[in-house]
């Protein structure tokens, strides 16, 4: 019987030996162990040994896989977190770039406000090429369109027969007057005539009857018209032509002086006399015209810059933060690329511009907070813009302007070949390698599991054979014992 007990001891020892040998086998994936453990083969392996073979193989595979798997997972998580951090930094720098584009745009500094001391004189509009300054304005005459009025007659009365010739400058048109034409039909024919040289006919129904009013479509002496009757026209047509050829309002140009210099304009919208300034005249008289640079777009651009910069600075702070209580670090803590970005941007912010009397951001009321964000004193900025807007422009723009330098830096950082994108590209390459490593690890673990299944299959067969031998020997010994007792 002791020998039979020895068989059981032998099977346990063999199992232990195989388990020990398994710990030195090649590595594999965590997924391979899970797949094998569910097969019918593993479930049947322990039948001859009394061992939980499924749990043994799973534990061996997991132990072999744990180290390499943890290394791949940790590195992948770290790389993905860094990519997310660098992408967030790129986004914040893109916002800063937009604000810098606004701050360096010539349009930001080329908006002007123009006012008239006498508002009844009209209004003023400006273009970006205007120049600041004050001018004396004296309007002596407004531009007018010629107007002529016919004699009154009944709405049903016909005029006669013949032709009306209407001429404006070098253009003219002939209007045929038939036997049934009234003033209304003549007016309609004038308005609908092909080649109308630039007049509009209107019927006014007055207390004395209908009257035809002929008006130039444009103001100015060059747009005056003349009306004549063609040869052979009736007396009524001739009388109408004579009336319409006598202006009730004469065509005239606007006449004015700017700083004592005479100016004439065919319209009451006077442009070109002052570069970038259009006068929209409504009355005669004198006024002071003042053109000043508008500081509103500049103020807005500076505020947008401070806001965008603070978004970038806050993002950078978060990415490199460390919480000593929770022991949690930002994903780019100690990152050389982020440090280089911060260092170079900070250097430009602290620089002075020698070409501007407003030489630093501090002179505009922009100062640095302890956390690296910017603070803006609106009063200081308003005073700087009011006293010398040109110096503010020079501080930001030009070759050595702060906004120009920052824009160049940020463009470089965020370009496709820039430092940030290069880092992201390298990290993505690492992730590709880690994916290959994961595939290889999974394959190794699958092989390792297969080896263990083979080993435990052999063990199960061996133990089953030993158990059969043990059963046979037991029966034989029992038979011998029975025979001996009978003798």
Image (cartoon, rainbow, N blue to C red):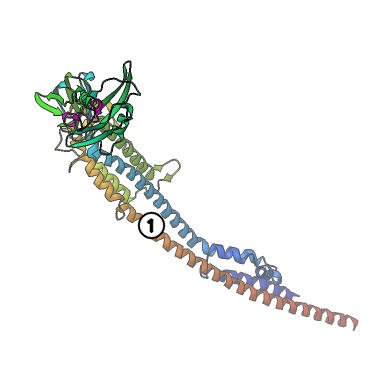
- Identified at 54% across, 71% down, the residue is 447
The foreground one among 33 and 130 is 130
- Identified at 30% across, 40% down, the residue is 99
Q: Which residues are magenta?
A: 214-237
Which part of the image, by quadrant, shows the N terminus?
Answer: bottom right
Which part of the image, by quadrant, shows the C terminus?
Answer: bottom right
Disc 1 on helix, strand or loop? helix
- Residue 237 in percent (x, y) is at 24, 27
Q: Is residue 464 above or below residue 89?
A: below
Answer with left or right where residue 469 lies relative to residue 362: right
The foreground one among 289 and 227 is 227
Q: Quadrant of residue 180?
A: top left
Q: Residues within 10 Å of mark 1 (few under 14, many from 20)?
A: some
- Is residue 377 among the parts visible in the rendering? no
- Residue 270 in percent (x, y) is at 18, 29
- Residue 151 in percent (x, y) is at 26, 20
Q: Quadrant of residue 474?
A: bottom right
Is residue 286 one of those drawn in magenta?
Answer: no
Q: Quadrant of residue 396?
A: top left
Residue picked out by circle 1: 427
Is residue 235 one of those drawn in magenta?
Answer: yes
Answer with left or right where residue 199 lies relative to residue 317: left
Q: Is residue 409 above or below residue 70?
A: above
The foreground one among 368 and 150 is 150
- Identified at 27% across, 45% down, the residue is 343
- Is residue 128 among the parts visible in the rendering? yes
- Residue 483 in percent (x, y) is at 87, 83
Answer with left or right where residue 484 lies relative to residue 47: right
Q: Is residue 93 above or below residue 365?
A: below
């Amino acid at each position: 019987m002791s020998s039979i007990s020895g068989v059981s001891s032998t099977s346990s020892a063999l199992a232990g030996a195989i388990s020990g040998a398994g710990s030195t086998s090649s590595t594999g994936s965590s997924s391979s162990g899970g797949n094998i453990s569910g097969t019918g083969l593993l479930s049947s392996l322990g039948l001859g040994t009394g061992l939980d073979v499924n749990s043994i193989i799973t534990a061996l595979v997991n132990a072999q896989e744990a180290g390499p798997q943890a290394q791949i997972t940790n590195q992948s998580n770290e790389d993905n977190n860094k990519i997310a951090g660098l992408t967030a930094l790129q986004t914040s720098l893109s916002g800063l770039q937009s604000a810098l584009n606004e701050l360096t745009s010539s349009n930001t500094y080329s908006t002007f406000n123009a006012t008239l001391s006498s508002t009844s004189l009209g209004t003023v509009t400006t273009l970006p090429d205007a120049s600041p300054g004050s001018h004396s304005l004296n309007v002596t005459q407004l531009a007018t369109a010629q107007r002529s009025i016919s004699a009154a007659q009944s709405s049903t009365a016909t005029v006669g027969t013949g032709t009306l010739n209407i001429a404006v400058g070098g253009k003219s048109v002939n209007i045929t007057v038939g036997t049934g034409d009234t003033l209304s039909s003549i007016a309609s024919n004038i308005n609908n005539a092909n080649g109308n040289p630039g007049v509009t006919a209107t019927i006014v129904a007055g207390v004395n009857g209908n009257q035809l009013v002929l008006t130039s479509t444009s103001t100015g002496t060059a747009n005056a018209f003349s009306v004549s009757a063609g040869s052979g026209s009736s007396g009524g047509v001739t009388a109408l032509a004579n009336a319409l050829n006598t202006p009730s309002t004469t065509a005239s140009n606007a006449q004015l002086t700017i700083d004592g210099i005479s100016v004439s304009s065919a319209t009451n919208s006077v442009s070109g006399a002052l570069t970038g300034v259009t006068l929209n005249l409504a009355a005669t008289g004198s006024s002071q015209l003042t053109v000043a640079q508008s500081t509103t777009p500049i103020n807005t651009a500076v505020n947008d810059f401070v806001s965008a910069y603070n978004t970038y600075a806050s993002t950078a702070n978060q990415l490199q933060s460390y919480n000593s209580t929770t022991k949690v670090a930002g994903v780019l803590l100690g990152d050389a690329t982020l440090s280089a970005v911060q260092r170079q941007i900070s250097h430009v912010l602290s620089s002075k511009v020698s070409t501007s009397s407003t030489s630093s951001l501090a002179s505009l009321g922009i100062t640095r907070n302890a956390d690296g964000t910017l603070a803006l004193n609106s009063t200081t900025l308003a005073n700087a813009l009011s006293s010398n807007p040109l110096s503010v422009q020079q501080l930001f723009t030009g070759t050595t302007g702060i906004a120009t330098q920052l824009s160049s830096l940020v463009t470089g950082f965020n370009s496709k070949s820039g430092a940030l994108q290069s880092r992201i590209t390298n990290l993505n390459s690492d992730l590709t390698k880690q994916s290959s490593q994961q595939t290889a690890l999974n394959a190794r673990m699958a092989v390792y599991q297969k080896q263990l299944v083979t080993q435990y299959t052999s063990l199960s067969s061996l133990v089953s054979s030993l158990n059969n031998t043990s059963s046979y020997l037991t029966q034989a010994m029992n038979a011998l014992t029975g025979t001996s007792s009978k003798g």
